[in-house]
Image (cartoon, grey):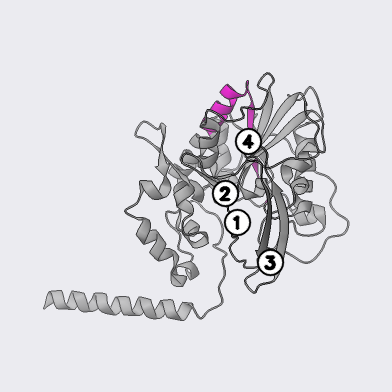
């Protein structure tokens, strides 16, 4: 009799969840998952440190638009055959020597953008606006924000930096959907930067957005965006001694939970309740900073002492948690998280799908050239 009562309770609970799921699917849908927070941890105020690079802001725009960015749902981009390559170690990569036209539509079929991407012989996005033979190297590392999703080659963040100084040869090491794990696997590869001069020091700028932490821990939100994303995100963890270890991809390393994540990612009720797991915690911040530190060490070893700088994209909320751990590891940071881009541009800095627009990348490029003193030959 007791077993029957338990089974009836489970049955009615399932019915209630199904009813709630159906009800929520009738409500307006929002992809906003709320403020970025680390559970059970209040970050201390960021104290000045030698690793913090000073910021020199331009005067505010005299003409500020009252319109603010509103997310427009987009259809998933279908890339032409040959554009994306699968690397067993890195994940998805850009194919070499390509000229690829990409179109993206809104969910109601309206055109959002049509652009052309070019790649060089090493599978990097082409960075125009610079003559060969500059004396120093400047690597840009990141995801589609750095790659220039929805922008022409000359409009990307790295290209805008290239045309504003003549001291550094700029290289764009980034791709759609990448996280810190993909970048670490990339710099570890034997053929990484094989065509780049290693006789001089340089800099590497890792453009960080808050979504890079979920791409290390494989959170539910990734499955909501792209169900097979974790098949191409490298799996890393800290062992019992606190040492960084890597093994395959996230989907392969936790195959027993993949069906659960895929099932829950389809639930509108869980999305409406802003349910995401695993929630980022301090152990994940430690893991992320360990990945970045290993990236820094490899670049320093392979590229004659190259310095790694983590640039926090405007609007970042993870900066207050991550920067103290970067400070402990001696990793320089350039914190643009609090920059109100509308205040300086006079209008929002996003494309309709949320990626930076050309004006945002131009603004960031001017800011980076100024703050890192890239025109100053004494600036390293």
Q: From the image, which quarter does the C terminus lie in?
A: top right
Tell me if residue 173 comes above or below residue 349 in the rendering: above
Tell me if residue 72 comes above or below residue 175 in the rendering: below
Residue 41 in view, yes or no? no
First in sequence: mark 3 vs mark 2: 3
Q: Secondary structure at mark 4?
A: loop
How far apart are the alpha carbons under marks 3 and 2?
29 Å
Q: Nearer the viewer, mark 3 or mark 1?
A: 1
Pointers 1 and 2 in contact (C-beta within 8 Å): yes
Q: Which residue is rendered at x = 57% and y = 49% of the image?
A: 84
First in sequence: mark 4 vs mark 2: 2
Which dot marks residue 206?
Answer: none
Which residue is label 4 attached to?
122
Does 72 lie within the magenta span?
no
Q: Which residue is rendered at x = 37% and y = 78% of the image?
A: 18
Q: Secondary structure at mark 1?
A: loop
Residue 201 x, y percent position in the rendering: 68, 22
**Crowd class of label 4 (few under 14; some 14 to 19; many from 20; radius 10 Å):** some
- What residue occupies the far top of the structure in this picture? 199
Q: Secondary structure at mark 3?
A: loop
Q: Going by the image, does 380 lie left or right of 261?
A: right
Which dot marks residue 79?
Answer: 1
Q: Going by the image, does 245 lie left or right of 296?
A: left
Q: Nearer the viewer, residue 282 or 33?
A: 33
Which residue is label 3 attached to?
70
Which residue is label 2 attached to?
84
How far apart are the alpha carbons under marks 3 and 4?
37 Å
> What range of the chain is rendered magenta?
293-314
Residue 124 x, y percent position in the rendering: 65, 40
First in sequence: mark 4 vs mark 1: 1
């Amino acid at each position: 009799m007791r077993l029957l009562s338990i089974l009836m309770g489970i049955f009615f609970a399932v019915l209630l969840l199904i009813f709630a799921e159906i009800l929520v699917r009738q409500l307006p849908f929002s992809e906003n998952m709320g403020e970025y927070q680390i559970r059970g941890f209040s970050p201390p105020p960021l104290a000045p440190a030698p690793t913090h690079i000073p910021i020199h802001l331009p005067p505010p725009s005299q003409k500020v638009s009252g319109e603010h960015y509103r997310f427009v749902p987009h259809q998933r981009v279908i890339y032409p055959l040959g554009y994306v390559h699968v690397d067993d170690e890195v994940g998805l990569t850009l194919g070499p020597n390509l000229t690829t036209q990409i179109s993206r539509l809104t969910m109601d079929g309206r055109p959002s953008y049509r652009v052309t991407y070019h790649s060089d012989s090493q599978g990097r996005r082409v960075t125009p606006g610079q003559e060969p033979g500059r004396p120093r190297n400047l690597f840009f590392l990141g995801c589609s924000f750095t790659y220039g999703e929805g922008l022409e080659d000359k409009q990307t963040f790295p290209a805008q930096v290239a045309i504003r100084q003549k001291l550094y040869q700029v290289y764009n090491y980034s791709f759609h959907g990448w996280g810190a794990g993909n970048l670490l696997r990339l710099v570890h590869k034997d053929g990484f930067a094989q065509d780049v001069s290693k006789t001089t020091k340089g800099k590497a700028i890792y453009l960080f957005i808050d979504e890079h932490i979920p791409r290390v821990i494989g959170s539910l939100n990734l499955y909501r965006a792209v169900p097979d994303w974790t098949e191409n995100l490298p799996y890393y963890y800290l062992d019992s001694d606190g040492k960084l270890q890597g093994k395959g991809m996230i989907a392969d390393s936790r195959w027993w939970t993949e069906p659960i994540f895929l099932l829950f990612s389809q639930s509108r009720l869980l999305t409406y309740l802003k349910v995401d797991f695993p929630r980022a915690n301090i152990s994940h911040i430690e893991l992320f900073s360990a990945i970045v530190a290993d990236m820094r060490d490899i670049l320093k070893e392979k590229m004659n002492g190259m310095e790694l700088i983590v640039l926090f994209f405007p609007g970042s909320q993870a900066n207050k948690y991550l920067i103290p751990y970067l400070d402990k590891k001696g990793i320089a940071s350039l914190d643009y998280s609090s920059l109100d881009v509308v205040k300086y541009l006079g209008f929002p800095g996003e494309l309709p799908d949320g990626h930076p627009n050309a004006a945002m990348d131009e603004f960031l490029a001017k800011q980076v050239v100024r703050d890192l003193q890239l025109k100053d030959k004494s600036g390293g």
